[in-house]
Image (cartoon, grey):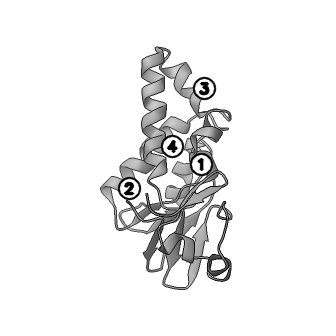
Amino acid sequence: MPSTLTEFEAPVNICGDIHGQYSDLLKIFEVCGLPYKHKYLFLGDYVDRGRHSLEVIVLLLALKVQFPKHFFLLRGNHEVRKINSVYGFKDELIARYPAVDDWLSLHGAFNDVFAEMPLAAVVSGKILCMHAELVGRYSENQATDPCAATRNHARFDMGRSSSGN
């Protein structure tokens, strides 16, 4: 099982919600530098709301494959099937790939990838980064140590958590 926590050293450019805004994503690279020269951490919410969710997520995943030690992607709440089925990503796939088997297959594949993304990152052993609060029931240990849930590989899914599998 992949880790729900990723750790790396600064310096890093930390970027918030993209929400399908492809031109904004390109502007980030124009202003902050290209990923092969600079480290990036994206905090989630790549899809939904904007018109170009597909371009955004495909580019981000390609950059992650090309620069795995310089490019980090966290899971936001829109990288959950229940959310991206309602807020535009599924509709974008249907519009572009109207055959039900095509869009359904793509939607499932992207959500499978999203489910493997870490929930949090620790930069230089000091800075905890995540899209938003961790959702789920916390033990007392997890409440006092925000990284405890991710260090023991707890799985979080829209209000329910379970350790292990």
User: Which numbered disc, 3 or 2, marks the residue that appears first in the sequence?
Assistant: 2
Label 4, on which residue? 56
Q: Position of residue 10 (x, y in %)?
A: 47, 80
Residue ID at (41%, 49%): 61
| Numbered mark located on residue 24 in the image | 1
Residue 154, compared with residue 83, is above or below; it is: below
Q: CA distance from mark 4 to mark 1?
A: 10 Å
Number of other residues with Cα within 10 Å of mark 4, as a class: few under 14, some 14 to 19, many 20 or more: many
Q: Is residue 72 left or right of residue 75?
A: left
Number of the front mark, 1 or 3: 3
Which residue position is annotated with label 2? 64
How far apart, in angstroms, are the residues tagged by discs 2 and 1?
A: 18 Å
Mark 1 surroundings: few (<14), some (14-19) or many (≥20) residues within 10 A: few
Q: Nearer the viewer, mark 4 or mark 3?
A: 3
- Along the viewing direction, whichever of 138 and 41 lies nearer the viewer: 138
Q: Is residue 79 above or below residue 38?
A: above
Which quarter of the rendering shows the N terminus? bottom left
Question: In the image, is 106 to the left or to the right of 17?
Answer: left
Sequence-first tag of 4 and 2: 4
Q: Amino acid at mark 4?
A: Val
Decide: marks 4, 3 in contact (CB < 8 A)? no
Three-letter amino acid code at the position of disc 1: Asp
How far apart are the two marked residues, 3 and 2, measured between alpha carbons?
Answer: 25 Å
Mark 1 or mark 3: name the one nearer the start of the chain.
1
At mark 2, the secondary structure is helix
Asked which secondary structure carries label 1, the reply is helix
Q: Residue drawn at (57%, 44%), measured in percent from left and top?
A: 23
User: Mark on residue 91?
Assistant: 3
